[in-house]
Image (cartoon, rainbow, N blue to C red):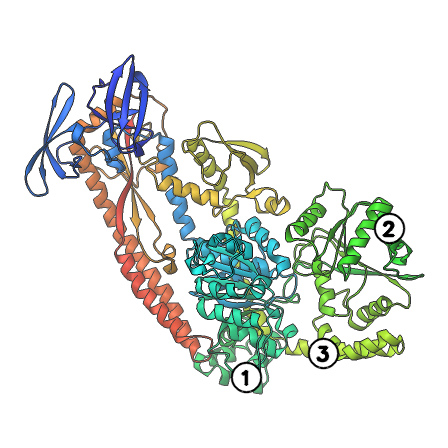
Amino acid sequence: MEQFIPGQRWISNTESELGLGLILEVSFKRVTVLFLASDQRRIYAQDNAPLTRVRFSVGDTIESIDEERFTVLSLTEVDGLITYLGRSIDGEEVEVEEIELNHHIQFNKPQDRLFMGQIDPTAWFLLRYETWLRLQQHQQSPVKGLLGGRASLIPHQLYIAQESANRAAPRIMLADEVGLGKTIEAGLILHHRLINGLSKRVLIIVPESLVHQWLVEMLRRFNLRFSVFDEARCLEELGDDGFDDGLDESSGKGGNPFSNEQLILCSQSFFANYPRRQQQAIDAGWDMVIVDEAHHLEWSEKAASPDYLFVEQLGLQTPGLILLTATPEQLGKESHFARLRLLDPDRFYSFAAFLEEERQFEPVANAAKALLAEKPLDAGEVNLLSKLLKDDNVDGLLKSLTDPEKSAVAREKLINILLDHHGTGRILFRNSRQTVQGFPDRERYGYPLAGAENSDDLQQDARFAWLVDKIKELAGQKALVICKHAQTAIDIEQVLKNRIGIAAAVFHEGMTIIERDRAAAYFADQDSSARLLVCSEIGSEGRNFQFVHHLILWDLPTNPDLLQQRIGRLDRIGQKHVIQIHIPYVENSDNALLYRWYDEGLDSFRSNNSAAQRVADILSAELKSVLQTKTGVDAFIAKTKALNEEIDTELHNGRDQLLELNSCRHEQAEELIDHLSAFEKEGALWPYMEDVFECYGVDTEFHSPDCFIIRPSDHLRVSHFPGLDEDGFTVTITRACALAREELQYLTWEHPIVTASMDLILSSETGNANVSVIRHPDLKAGQFLLECLFIIECSAPAEFQMGRFLPHTPIRILIDQHKKDLTAAIDHRSLVETGTKFDKQQIVSFLNTQRDYISVILSLAEQIAQEQMAEIVDTATTTMLESLAAEIKRLVRLKKVNPTIKADEIEQLKDMAALAQENIQAAQLRLDAVRFIVTS
């Protein structure tokens, strides 16, 4: 061990960020070191101080305390203190004592740390290399951005996310039928864009009743932490107490309250009640705006609602806009057009022109139906297809339709070409239950009751007595009760609890968002005593209770859409049980008549009826009359049934089957699922994270199969491990377990703690300098090798998604002491450490005596890496050009037949290709880590 002498410069092996240390005092087997750069003082035991003597070599460029840089020509040592003789940038000779060296000098370069003896354990070097490999794998994955969602792998949701999220500026409408997961689709798109750096600032606007649900869903499913903004939060951001209405907010502390957070969630009613916040939101600048329940935004050619106009202005200022809305069939043509004009006002400028375009599109739809029906095409249909697709050279495919061996492939290719011609196919996604599998069966049970309804005294209501008996009959099974009014829900819960002794949760619009969510969580808890959740109509909009399969309808709405929304809280993809719908009704009451109307006339209990609302709109006056007079019921139900069948047939025949196909191309969706499944089956994530936790002092404990507890230990290497609080948490690494157990964190390659861990490793010098003693059958004992890890770095704007073509790419080079390249011959994983201890000072001394020779080997390794980089860059350039050129050609071809393709979009792709090529060609090579290997 070198002797400590006051005035010497040493550096900390464990806290290199402290800068150069100065020996102040040596006494009583202790050494006191002052780190002036960080204004820190440390006292160490002399015999095991984690310090390395700073000794620069001839040729090094260093800096004095006066920030004068010079190159070392020679050095002398007197009484243990070094004096450097060097030449400044101006060519003047300078003499600098080591006490005069710049206090801020750090040794972050791998070779500097190696020569200075700042050596990390081998496990850290291996972890660094593994991190680069995993990062490269993730960057080039076709499912990057889709890995981190806690959601089932449902084809149509994944397809929509992948198809829209990769666009430069997604402006789309999600109009799936109830229960198909529009919120998850929006979350997947958002998560994808945030992970890929394509969006940073996002505003979500939802109905007041759904604010907390969106907040929880974004956090629980996608680890996205949104801030809920209301008037109180805005005043807080601005430093305003709210009393001075005349205050100029632009002079407030925050200026624009929406500028202080990146991810913001607001209710529609907040902006309606505080119009002054609308302009601030418009001015705040967003990359993406998401609007839920967008069908509530009212518009006509004569006038538009303030809410609609606000979203319209937001859309004009924001590149990305996603509208979650009802299906086009439910909206009606004018309302559907109103949503489309928000997304693309240049294209959808006139309702009359939109109707004319739809009429012109009918031949395309008819041609698609003929192909999808898999029936022989007549001469007229073949002629129609030939005219429609005259620019697509389809004559050969049309001839193949008559060949039994070729017809299936020809049909598929023709359908794909027609899909590209689809008018609204690139901005509208609409999946139906007919095309999406996985929904449960429904069973309805009607209970005619004698007696009367009594809202003033529920115990005198025949339905209440039935309800008590039904709860007992269900024997502990959970059930959801929905009624029209909040007071009814409150009364039912109170009477059940106070007079019958049955615990239930209640959920209604008079409760705060937090109260509603607590009630829903209390009901969802399997250990709670509440077997019943009683909710008003508000409970049937946006809420998801698919863990329940008993639905009790206390009363019935006159609106079929409301009935479907009620049933849709249980009837969702992922529901494991047959849904049992219970409808108690007093004979000869309004509910009795509505039960027959829904059951016999519309068949709305057993299945989702797309025609029901249109039937109800047409017959609304007659329904009102029949409910009042209770006469002509049978005739009215027969009329309802006939009209329902007529409209249902019309809807079925008019179904835009091309739109449904374009909303989920199953072959592509299945490829995405295969990629995602492969990542999960690889099983590499937890072993990798165990190595990370071991390196940084995080304790792990087995919890149950595929589940682990992680918590900080008393020996953390960093003051705070990112994403980990002092209590720790439990994680699972399987999707199935994550979906079944919401209290567990779902660990994926895109979980914040994983991505932050990688950043922590690669942004520091962790593991970038190492000495290992290894034994290998192909290597003689007593020789040394250098294992170098170089990184190809390509800097480019995030929207280029350069990681697809040239991510940060590790290049490993292994050179022996005879300057022989052994990279291909000796695999990295075969270099296993023996565990033999070595004298660190002896190794460091050897490294410095052989510094010039080792520097030559490092230069040779860099030269070999440069040659490999040239090949990698060429391949990346070719791949990028082929990929973007193919997309440009496709869009140019489609623009001739599909007006949704904008010239700007094509020009943007061309510019991107040119700039991407420049960035790839400008890629740089950097030595990231070096390992000095001694064989035994």
Residue that badge 2 annotates: 468
Residue drawn 53% across and 72% down? 309
Task: Sort mark 3 into few (<14), some (14-19) or many (20+) by Cα contacts within 10 Å.
Answer: some
Q: Which of the two residues, 314 or 229, is positioned nearer the viewer here?
A: 229
Badge 3 or badge 2: first in the primary sequence: 2
Q: Which residue does the numbered mark 3 point to in the structure image?
A: 647
Marker count (numbered): 3
Q: Is residue 812 above or below residue 421?
A: above
Please tell me in which quadrant of the rendered image residue 628 appears: bottom right
Observer-nearest residue: 910 or 343? 343
Q: Quadrant of residue 509?
A: bottom right
Question: Looking at this rendering, what residue extends furthest in the right direction?
Answer: 450
Marks 3 and 1, how far apart at CA = 30 Å
* Residue 585 is at least partly visible in this image: yes
Give left or right: position of 591 versus 675.
right
Camera-nearest label, 2 or 1: 2
Q: CA distance from mark 2 to mark 1?
A: 64 Å
Q: Give the crowd class for mark 1: few <14, some 14-19, many >=20 residues within 10 Å.
A: some
The label nearer to you, 3 versus 2, is 2
Can see residue 569? no
- Image height check: is 31 above or below 511? above
* Quadrant in which the N terminus appears: top left
Q: Position of residue 428 (x, y in %)?
A: 54, 70
Is 662 or 762 nearer to us in this picture? Answer: 762
Q: Mark 3 vs mark 1: which is more N-terminal?
A: 1
**Dot 1: element:** helix
**Residue type marked 3:** Ile
Instruction: Give the percent coordinates (x, y) of residue 206.
Output: 58, 61
Q: Position of residue 391 (x, y in %)?
A: 43, 81
Amino acid at pointer 2: Val
The label on residue 476 is none
**Which residue does the numbered mark 1 point to in the structure image?**
382
